[in-house]
Amino acid sequence: MIAWPQHLIVLPILIPLIAGAGLLFIPDRQRSVKAMVSLAATIALGAVSLLLMAASGESRFGAVYLVGNWAAPFGIVLVLDRLSALMVVLTALLAVPVLSFALARWHSAGAHFHSLYQFLLMGLNGAFLTGDLFNLFVFFEVMLAASYGLILHGSGPLRVKAGMHYIAINLAAALLFLIGVSLIYGTTGTLNMADLAERLPTIEPDRRLLMEAGAAVLGVAFLVKAGMWPLCFWLPSAYSVAAAPVAAILTLMSKVGIYIIIRLTLLLFAEGPSAGFGSGVLLYGGLATLAFGTIGVLASQALGRIGAYSVLVSSGTLLAITGLHDEAATSGALLYLLSSTLTLGAFFMLVELVERGQDAGASVLAVTMELYGDADNEVPEEGQGTTMPATLAVLGICFASCAILLSGLPPLSGFVAKFVMLSALIGTGSVGSSPTGGALIFVTLVILGGLATLIALTRAGIRAFWSSIEGTVPRVLVMEIVPIMLLLTITATLTVKAGPALAYADAAVRSIVDPGIYIKAVQGVAPQKSRRDHTAAPGE
Amino acid sequence: MELVLSAAIGFMTACGVWLLLRPRTYQVIVGLSLLSYAVNLFIFGVGGVKSDEPPLLTEGASVALLADPVPQALVLTAIVIGFATTALFLVVLLASRGLTGSDHVDGRSDPR
């Protein structure tokens, strides 16, 4: 008999699917009912994902779920190992606070917010759990179709314009995805990831060239999502104009591309004649992204754009680490992925609260004043200082925490993650080989990127909190600030519990660097006998 | 037959890419449609170009002559998804036209 915890694996896909589809039937007038259903489904998703994570920690390898009870290369499989469990948990950890933030006002800014949100979660979870390339394409399309709707949520000319660019580039990337998948199928005859990993080292040289071309085309499709440098110009404008909760959940979408790249490079190109395929592109592309993001962060005036370029900085860091093929650094990178995604999610929501009190032109005006001075209307010095309103104080503390996390300063988890990555690359100094050129450039860029983020956020923070021109206090609901604080608390917990988190990341990396474990786990699962077979042959 | 098929795919892709890079939204969507046709044909061709061969294994049928059913299944999925996303893009295109009053991809008033 199939054990019931096995069926848990499919729940992160089923819960949002059922909730999202069911929400379509509740009319928009019953907004609170919709909100409750959506929130309950997301919290249930969180509980299931935590259970899955606990289950994947027990055995050396998590579990494999045969959808439709067909054996591995023929049917579709869902694979739960530590890495995919980690990503599913991250999705839920970000999804619950973002949804409760959206409940304050954003969910009523357009139609079907909750359904789209649930479908986005379904696509994300599916992409993390699937073990089949074409199934991955389907989940990518589910996720993208939902994100097209969400990015237009709230409407307005800016969103429609950025949304149109976003849809056009993602449709083109989806076509590249299809070309890559079909080339790989044509040369290897399989789409199952484990089967593919097993066959790759032995295919003939003339087919290998075509297969590598297919893998490269496929890689371009993922790199568009991840935002690697020459493919990333759509990202800042799309992320900075999206509604705050949408931008916050979209930070996960760039991480999906990175997850797939980590998964596929380690699984398919670990050994054999194609070993290390594409790692140069990932390393130098990642470094270029890091540099581009850093310059973008420094050049941005609006807070939303700083956040969007920080997404690029984080993507660049993770891609370069993937290209370096360093086990210890990769587990640091997983920690960095957790920390930066949660922080950026909190940051995008915070930006909306901070900017609520300001005029659209106020920030531009502030910059001009900074540059040219405003000697004509000098503000008279006040005799006694004014007390800061409580709202601004809370927002300011959250903003400062985000700045510390994003730039990687102690004591929060951004620092811990960066420290693990850098110390793995430089070495402890006493023993070991000297770092390579690529690693040194990476270390330099990461440190410079942290400095640039700190400068940009300090500048923006001073302008927003200490020298705001009109001095109006944004009206902020408790319901809106609590999710942000919750996300920051999670990163603080990640700091305190950095040891166990890093041990988990280490175990996750160890189980993915050896493709043999993955292949054996997927192929070792036999389909369950149906009840009819049992009754037909009771003697067996 | 292979030559004709590959030439058709190549020509369609070339037209699609050119149209995709044009400044008017209508050209972009026609380009995307052409590209998706080309990709669908490409997926179809990946299974080997055969005519009059069933994808079903029956008694006495030679495996070498069989048409590969997997690309056919893939292309079906790809057509459905491509159709839906193109329809969605069309809606966004109309929204953009309504909001900016022009069909330039950047919403500029003098599309050239």
Image (cartoon, coloured by chain):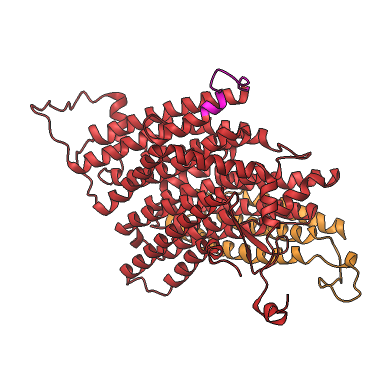
Chain colours: A red, B orange
Query: How many numbered discs, if any?
Result: 0
In the image, residue A311 above or below residue A246:
above
The answer, for residue A338, to whether it is visible in the render is yes
Image quarter (top left, top right, bottom left or bottom right) of the N terminus of chain A = bottom right
In terms of depth relative to the viewer, which is nearer, B91 or B25? B91
Q: Position of residue A311 (x, y in %)?
A: 47, 40
Left or right of A409 in this view: A18: right
Q: Position of residue A516 (x, y in %)?
A: 70, 47
Instruction: Determine the residue located farthest toward the bottom in the rendered image.
Output: A536
Image quarter (top left, top right, bottom left or bottom right) of the C terminus of chain A = bottom right
Examine the structure image and report whether residue A258 is included in the region drawn in magenta: no
In the image, residue A121 above or below residue A212:
below
In terms of depth relative to the viewer, which is nearer, B44 or A56? A56
Instruction: Determine the residue located farthest toward the front in the rendered image.
Output: A539
Instruction: Determine the residue located farthest toward the top in the rendered image.
Output: A430
Examine the structure image and report whether residue A424 is included in the region drawn in magenta: yes
Question: Residue B37 lies in what quarter of the image?
Answer: bottom right
Q: Position of residue B107 (x, y in %)?
A: 48, 50
Q: Residue at x 75, y 63 (%)?
A: B71
Would you say the magenta stretch is mainly helix, strand or loop? loop
Left or right of A387 in this view: A351: right
Q: Position of residue A147 (x, y in %)?
A: 49, 56
Question: Residue A329 lies in what quarter of the image?
Answer: top right
Give the residues drawn in magenta, as a range: A422-436
Q: Residue at x 50, y 61 (%)?
A: A12
In terms of depth relative to the viewer, which is nearer, A392 or B107? A392
The answer, for residue B108, to whether it is visible in the render is no
Left or right of A156 in this view: A332: right
